[in-house]
Image (tube, grey):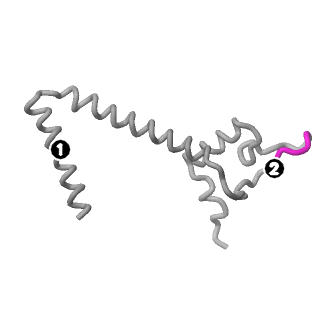
Amino acid sequence: MKALFSFIVVLLLVLVAYAGVAVANQHFLFGVIIPYAAVATFLIFMIYRILKWGSSPVPFRIPTTCGQQKSLPWIKQSKLENPSGLLGVAGRMALEVLFFRSLFRNSRPS
């Protein structure tokens, strides 16, 4: 039943677009403005969701870092694997969101 409702809604949207182009001669609106508005809406809310996800508190620590923590000055820190500043956290989050790095860790068969 839910699939039929979705199918009817899609048909109605197609009919609205067809009527807007064929009857009302609104080629620019349906060919340029609405697609750009849809892409812009998608990107804005995707960025919003990523920022909301990044600012949510984690109830427990997940030890997925495998680099050297910031400690003594003569020991080199792994800034992307174990970040201590805002820029490192943003870089590590960007790599995780775009490339899903933690999924490919320890994926070697035994």
Q: Is residue 63 magenta?
A: no
Q: CA distance from mark 2 to mark 1?
A: 56 Å
Percent position (x, y) of residue 19?
11, 36
Mark 1 lies on residue: 14
Secondary structure, mark 2, is: loop
On screen, residue 62 versus residue 40, left or right, reads right
Label total for image: 2
Percent position (x, y) of residue 12?
17, 46
Percent position (x, y) of residue 94?
60, 42
- SS assignment for the magenta stretch, majority: loop
Mark 2 lies on residue: 68
Mark 2: amino acid: Gln
Q: Residue at x 25, y 61 (%)?
A: 3
Is tag 2's residue or tag 1's residue first in the polypeptide sequence?
1
Mark 2, Cα crowd under 10 Å, few <14 / some 14-19 / many 20+, is some
Q: Residue at x 43, y 37 (%)?
A: 43
Mark 1, Cα crowd under 10 Å, few <14 / some 14-19 / many 20+, is few
Mark 1: amino acid: Val
